Amino acid sequence: MNFPNWLVWIDKNLRWLSIPKLPLFLIIIQVLGFFLVMSKPAFAEQLYLDPKAVLGGEVWRIFTFISTPLMENFLVFFVLWFFYYVMVWLEEAWGSALLTIYFLFAWLGTVLVSISTALVSGFLEIDVPIKVFANMEYIGCSFFFALATLNPNKEIHLFFILPIAFKWIAIFIAVVLLLEPLLFHSYEHLLYLSLLFANYLIFFGKGYWLYFKKELERRRRL
């Protein structure tokens, strides 16, 4: 892969930053969050990354939002099983250090974008629906997009029967994510999404740029 040079340097020199068994760690946090919310649904309100609440002193939310359940029924265990293997496959491809950096960029990006959006919306006196986005959903999507980029033809059997390539799932998710703000004219949401996936652009942007340049040069020679 064509990683930026500074990212390669981090991978070689700062491997101590890696979080041991990160995939298992995130799944355990999600499972704990699920059972906590199932036993006391009102507690979910204390886990969300509500940026206005963070600015009001509830700093724990910048950490606890990663435990907000992706779903509030037992189908979540199928989702978490798939999410776990996505992270394991990425760890095998990149190593523990780069997987950790990818997650930290996703986590930090979510926190910064949420809080900065809250500050801007407050300054401009506009209502931007932030809280609903501040959970693990988009972080999980960014992991899947990374795997689909690395191995687009890898397949999963939908409902354990129908084989479908990762690239088609990734395209479907991306289209849904883009269509929602466009259909409802929520351009703030579109900007918010693009910033949330900054970790993906940091890791894969250079590769896309080099491919674009190579393709442009090829067409000029025709």
Image (tube, helix red, strand yellow):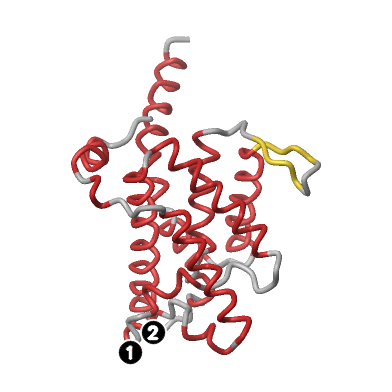
Nearest the camera: 60 or 149? 60
Q: Position of residue 75 (x, y in %)?
A: 70, 64
* Kind of residue indicated by mark 1: Gly
Q: Give SS at disc 2.
A: helix
- The reply, left or right, for residue 45 in relation to residue 38 is left
Q: Give SS at disc 1.
A: loop
What residue lies at 40% left-to-right and 84% top-to-bottom? 125
- The reply, left or right, for residue 139 in relation to residue 40 is left
Mark sitting on residue 52: 2
Q: Position of residue 17 (x, y in %)?
A: 25, 52
Q: Position of residue 97 (x, y in %)?
A: 32, 45
Residue 59, picture quadrant: bottom left
Mark sitting on residue 76: none
* Kind of residue indicated by mark 2: Lys
What residue lies at 58% left-to-right and 63% top-to-bottom? 181
Mark sitting on residue 56: 1
131 lies above or below 149 = below
